[in-house]
Image (cartoon, rainbow, N blue to C red):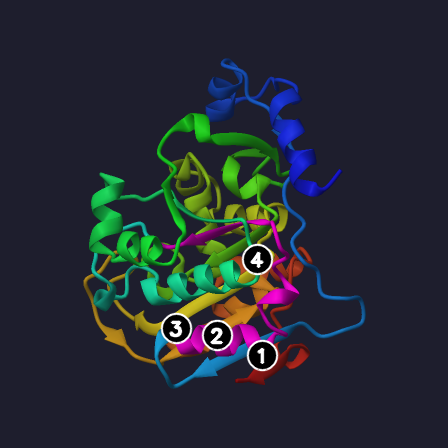
Amino acid sequence: MDRRDFLRRGLAAGATLALGGCAGREAARGARSLGGRQGIPTPRGQKPLLAVAAKGKPGALTRRAIDALGGIRKFVRSGQVVVIKPNIAWQRPPEQAATTNPEVVATLVRMCREAGAARVIVVEHSVDIPARLVFDIAGMQKAVDAVGGELISAHEQSMYREVKIGGQLLAQEQVIEHILAADLFINVPIAKSHDATKLTLSMKNLMGAIWNRQGWHSSASLSRCIAEFAGAVRPDLVVLDANRILVAGGPKGPGQTRDPQMVIASTDQVAVDAYCTGLFGMKPADIEHITIAASLGIGQADLAQVQIKHA
């Protein structure tokens, strides 16, 4: 039985949990317990590989970055279901750098289909509503439709399932079912400033995969929640859009932008975030959730211990 079959059976037969808070309200209507996602770990004794493609158009940079990691067929097998989670939270056009560049996402969808993926689902729980207007303004609906992907809005609570996190702050969380059941999960954030966490990169982008974001904001530590969740629901691959970044006024903007013309990719989400702090003149230690995630062994924040390959 493969991972997808296991998860689907878990969705059908998971036991109801007696949980507190927001999760407790969900338990009253039959929440189910699932494991998270392991992601693709760096082999023991090896440095994580991080690919940096610079100077070019977003689609070409995306291909170059993935090729530097060994090519899309290293990750995607024929017949698989791939789920892509970009940042499409806001009613902003791509040029304002508040949402993931649609060309990056479309190129990933196309590459996955070329590798034989049976379905490529792009999913987001947007902040602004209605979601369809958000997707249209961000240019994502047209881009995904053009390459045979499926763009889904996760605005129904029935689309979420309980996952045991087992963290210091997060005992469990409600996560988009498509992500849990995917054969391959790709996190595709945009690099930008953020008023609460200084920066939003790959780990922070995972907040768009949960139902109750406000719970994290009202917790004892937003940064701790981000790190603990990133350790339990790990993407198999991170492809970060830094073609145009929002350096001030984030996360929604509008604000000051800059054009590094880069795409950064790795299976190590902490390494991606650590590297991208430099795009904003910062260090990994300046971002609390990166420091916490590294201390929890989720990934590598010491760039001296990362194999950086320029593509």
- Residue beneath disc 3: 59
Q: Assess whether residue 73 is covered by the magenta stretch.
A: yes
Give the left or right position of residue 65, taking residue 98 as reference.
Answer: right
**Left or right: 165, with 160 as reference point:** right
Mark 4 / mark 3, whichever is N-terminal: 3
Q: Residues within 10 Å of mark 1 (few under 14, many from 20)?
A: some
Return the x and y of residue 79 as percentages of the image width and height.
60, 50
Q: Dot 4 lies on which element?
A: loop
Image point 27% across, 66% down: which residue?
97
Q: Quadrant of residue 56?
A: bottom left
107 left or right, relative to 161: left
Q: Is residue 61 within the magenta segment?
A: yes
User: For the residue marked with disc 2, what is the amino acid?
Assistant: Arg
Residue that appears at 49% across and 24% down: 21
Q: How far, Cα to Cα, is label 1 from label 3?
A: 14 Å
Query: Pointer 4: residues within 10 angstroms few (<14), some, or many (20+)?
Result: some
Q: Which residue is mark 1?
A: 68
Closer to the camera, 148 or 51? Answer: 148
Say whether marks 2 and 3 touch (CB < 8 Å). Answer: yes
The residue that disc 2 covers is 63
Which of the two discs, 2 and 1, labels the residue nearer the N terminus?
2
Q: Could you tell me how far apart the alpha carbons at marks 4 and 3 are, in whole angstroms? A: 19 Å
Q: Is residue 44 above or below residue 24?
A: below
Find disc 4 in the rendering and name its residue: 116
**Residue numbers of the magenta segment:** 60-87
